[in-house]
Amino acid sequence: MPFDVILAGALGVSILLFALAGGADFGAGFWSLLARRGERATEQQQLIERSIGPLWEANELWVVVSAVILWSAFTPAFAAYGTALFVPFVLAIAGILLRGAFLAFRIEAQEEAPGAYRFFGEIFGSMSIITPFFLGTAAGAIASAGSG
């Protein structure tokens, strides 16, 4: 079997693992935005935070692995996609970073600063909507490139 086929398989597996692990939050930011009202809002938000905690940090590894495989094994494709899809890639990466940071800030602010807890939750939720949008935009552009 040619080595590039093995590397393409590894790239596919790393993307699949990222997708199967819910893109890091399984839509928790969206559900967190919906859990802002009602008598159980705080309880629901804390449940969301506890449920994604064990998976949160490890899952972003698959994005890095995918990028490194694409960069090192398929340099022309990396250059073409990186140039053509620079804006959605940068916005998705910014969303991934902000989503993680504001979830951590939110958890730390829970006891001491309820206002900051809500604000950080809004940013976390917003980034959890924006990030998949830009990842999907990039994936759709890549998938449709050969059909146009």
Image (cartoon, grey):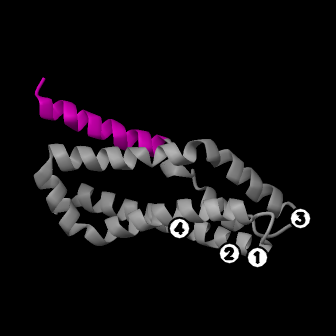
Identity, as a three-letter code, of the amino acid under mark 4:
Met
Q: Is residue 48 visible?
A: yes
Q: Is residue 19 above or below residue 29?
A: above
Residue 130 among those drawn in magenta = no
Q: Earlier in the sequence, mark 3 or mark 1?
A: 3
Mark 4 — residue? Answer: 127
Q: Earlier in the sequence, mark 2 or mark 3?
A: 3
Identity, as a three-letter code, of the amino acid under mark 2:
Phe
Identity, as a three-letter code, of the amino acid under mark 1:
Gly
Q: Residue at x 85, y 67 (%)?
A: 38
| Left or right: residue 52 compared with residue 89 | right
**Image depth: mark 3 or mark 4 in front:** 4
Q: Earlier in the sequence, mark 1 or mark 4?
A: 1
**Image depth: mark 3 or mark 1 in front:** 1
Identity, as a three-letter code, of the amino acid under mark 3:
Glu
Question: Residue 105: image x %, image y %?
Answer: 64, 64
Q: Residue at x 59, y 72 (%)?
A: 123
**Image depth: mark 1 or mark 4 in front:** 1
| Left or right: residue 123 compared with residue 78 | right
